[in-house]
Image: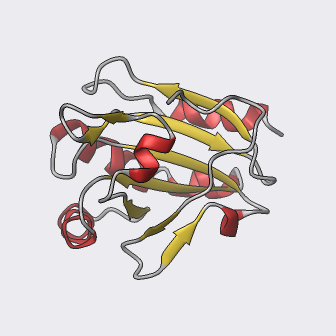
Amino acid sequence: MAVPAIDQPAPDFALPSTAGVEVSLAGQRGATVLLAFFPLAFTRVCTTELCDFSRDLPRFDEAGTRVFGISVDSVPVLKEFRARHGITVDLLSDFKREVSRRYDTLLEDAFFSRRAYFIVDRDGILRWSWVEAEIGHKRDNHELLDQLARLR
């Protein structure tokens, strides 16, 4: 598989969430969406990243953007991760690894996802993506918010 192409429809999916409902990408039409794939809950960089998203959630809201963290962890693990660290963004469980494969983020040998970001516009079109070369690296929120501002 290859990373989905910019200016093409983003691959749709439906995943269970920590909010207790299934979240589909198609169900987000009308809003810009940031999909943030992360390797594993409770790891240092992932914890920092998700806490940063939570801290800056009002800025993403102002940008008209819904932020979803996606990992291969189970929903119960993700719920505990949210509770323990006060994370306010909704987390989606790609436990079967199907969405990570569809977005070409899965590290097959490690069986978890690379850290990657995908911005999908209100019509479901992929407008920007970034896949980290090293899982210990992450984008800063100001860079993601700058990318979102360019879509307006």
Q: Is residue 140 above or below residue 49?
A: above
Q: Residue at x 69, y 63 (%)?
A: 26
The residue located at (36%, 73%) in the rendering is 18
Percent position of residue 152, x then y: 83, 40
Q: Position of residue 68 (x, y in %)?
A: 49, 56
Q: Is residue 81 left or right of residue 138?
A: left
User: Hey, which quadrant is residue 84 in on the image?
Assistant: bottom left
**Farthest residue toward the top?**
133
Foreground of the two, 148 or 2 = 2
Answer left or right for 25 relative to 41. Answer: right
How many numbered marks does the figure carry? 0
The residue shown at (73%, 59%) is: 31
Tell me which colouring the rendered structure shows. secondary structure
Q: Residue lying furthest bottom in this view?
A: 20
Q: Which residue reaches farthest front?
A: 1
Whether residue 102 sits left or right of residue 114 in the image: it is right
- Please tell me in which quadrant of the rendered image residue 110 appears: top left
Which residue is rendered at x = 41% and y = 35% of the image? 105
Please state if 70 lies on the left or on the right of 64 as rendered.
Answer: left
Where is 115 relative to 38, above or below?
above
Q: Say if 79 sits above or below 49 in the image.
A: below
- Determine whether 45 is above or below 59 in the image: above
Looking at the image, which is closer to me, 88 or 70? 70
The x and y percentages for residue 99 are: 46, 50
